Amino acid sequence: MIGVGHSRFGERQDVNVKELAFEAVKEALNDAGLTPKDIQYMCLGSIGVWYEEPLPAVAVAEYCGLSGAGLMRVEAACATGSAAVYSAYTTVASGFTDLALVVGVEKMREVDTFTAVELMGRAGSYMWEFENFGLTFPGYYALYATAHMNRFGSTEEDLALVAVKAHKYGAMNPLAHFQKEITVEDVLSSYVVAWPLKLYDCCPISDGSAAIVLASEDKVRELKIDTPVWIAGIGASSGTGTLAYRSDFIGLDATVKASRNAYKMANIEPKDIDVATVHDCFTIAEILAYEDLGFCGKGEGHKLVREGQTEIGGKIPVNVDGGLKAKGHPIGATGVSMIVELTKQLREEVKPTSRQAPMKNYIALAHNVGGTGHYCYVTILKR
């Protein structure tokens, strides 16, 4: 990574999808010291069912001055952003190009909440679990929450602590959707969405964009980039579309497999990681991620959050940008946003500095899940 950019997340009725993408693209190109004409390939991640553009890669490229570059638009549910990063990474690593741009963008607030929830719910097992039983993603993750609580003794208060931590750091992040701290009581008293998940256990429906510029080693040397952040490993995996086919609901096998592949490629272990962003679409998802990524043993994730071990100053700072829960979750932008945040962490450029995680090994991890482990990408960054 030689350039990163990020829009403000939230309800962005002030811009259309092209203008929203431009905010991140302009910042990323300026950060890299490049112009649009320097970009040879752009991969855009966007679900795109909420807004007006049926061909967002073409529309965004035209608006941003990138017409003529090779284009691709990818989708992997909530892991779309990381899938776009993976696509661009492989084009550079293979030698197909030496400069690539990744853009993640979503305008989810173009439809009402009920329509957005339905459209996301269709992304599970449509003909069986959605059409016949009305199961949407709060319900999917509620199944995992109740299973974890029954097996390991985690509580509603533990879930609330995840939300409190997210809002604590979101309040420090000027680009976050939610910038207000909350209390455990606020979470517990919010209305039930799918028990035990309440309103404050759920991420918001957000608009936003993020962008990164990837360069080959030769191009980094040519441009004399003094603070590149390298992709050291990427792991990808998947799970069944139909949850009824799974053996249990206490973890996401896709996360386990993707992370182990990424660790092997990067030649690291979980204990080497200085800071992480994990896919906390619901509070239980963050607790599952601690366990599946190997930050703790199975059934011990809630203990990490109880002890403050995933805050700055703890064992492994996680989601100190507010995470999906408070920063927001514009689906196509989320995975790219994670990489932007971690690049700034590894460069030690985070503002305000109260959000900066201490660096020892200069290694970071991004964990991006699509659906309920339907897709998973884990990306390891090093400086």
Image (spheres, rainbow, N blue to C red):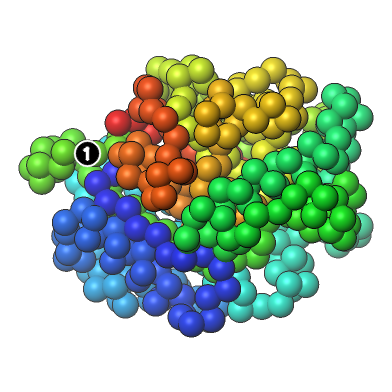
Residue at point 61%, 43% (across, down): 279
Q: Which residue is mark 1?
A: 227
Q: Where's the C terminus, which quadrant?
A: top left
Say which residue appears at 41% left-offset and 50% top-offset. 352
Between residue 239 and residue 223, name the one nearer to us: 223
Say which residue appears at 63% left-offset and 51% top-offset.
167
Q: The N terminus appears in which quarter of the rendering?
A: top left
Question: In which quarter of the view is residue 60 placed?
Answer: bottom left
Q: Is residue 76 visible in this depiction of the protein? A: no
Q: Nearer the viewer, residue 58 or 299?
A: 299
Residue 294: x and y in percent read 61, 21
Indicate left or right for 170 with 361 as reference.
right
Is 325 placed left or right of 302 in the picture? left
Callout 1 secondary element: loop
In the displayed structure image, the side of residue 307 where residue 336 appears, left or right: left
Q: Residue at x 61, y 55 (%)?
A: 326
Q: Residues within 10 Å of mark 1 (few under 14, many from 20)?
A: some
Q: Position of residue 154 (x, y in %)?
A: 84, 31
Residue 113 seen by the camera: yes
Under mark 1, the amino acid is Thr
**Horizontal and vertical percent position of residue 89:** 34, 42
Q: Nearer the viewer, residue 16 or 92?
A: 16
